[in-house]
Amino acid sequence: MAVIFVTYDLQTVGQNYHRIHDYLKNFQFSKHLEWVWLLDTMESVEGIRDRLKQLVDGNDIVFVAQLQRNWASSNFPGEDWLNSPARSW
């Protein structure tokens, strides 16, 4: 398993986020910033990206990356989630 960073920017005003959110909620997740999700999953970054591409328009932006234990934040409410021994780095 891995901790995956996911962010996106939908380019069309009023675009529906429900399908994206429903998909991402299938994972163990932390969501404390408006367009950022942290996932704990065995799914590859390419697999997550490919599925998200099916849920967004062709001009929307999707970024997916695997996080490492080496991270830093300031006032980030997801710190406890990231520091949990349950995370599968």
Image: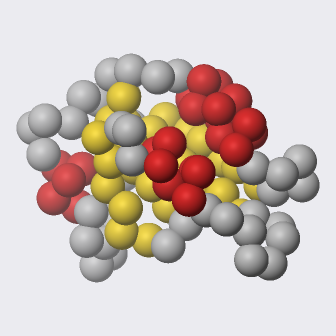
Between residue 79 and residue 20, name the one nearer to us. 20
- From the viewer's perspective, tell me whether residue 19 is left or right of residue 74: right
- Picture quadrant where residue 2 is located: top left
Please tell me which residue is depicted at 56% across the width and 39% down the height of the picture. 65
The x and y percentages for residue 55 are 70, 44
Please tell me which residue is depicted at 37% across the width and 61% down the height of the picture. 31
**In the figure, 66 relative to 37: above or below?**
above
The x and y percentages for residue 38 are 40, 49
- Assign the C terminus to one quadrant of the image: top left
State the residue lying farthest toward the right. Answer: 59
Between residue 74 and residue 33, name the one nearer to us. 33
In this rendering, the count of numbered labels is: 0
- Assign the N terminus to one quadrant of the image: top left
- Picture quadrant where residue 26 is located: top left
Between residue 17 and residue 74, name the one nearer to us. 17
- From the viewer's perspective, tell me whether residue 26 is left or right of residue 18: left
- From the viewer's perspective, tell me whether residue 66 is left or right of residue 57: left
- Picture quadrant where residue 76 is located: bottom left
The x and y percentages for residue 43 are 46, 22
Colour scheme in the image?
A: secondary structure
Is residue 19 visible in this depiction of the protein? Answer: yes
Please tell me which residue is depicted at 49% across the width and 35% down the height of the picture. 66
- From the viewer's perspective, tell me whether residue 75 is left or right of residue 2: left
**In the figure, 32 relative to 68: above or below?**
below
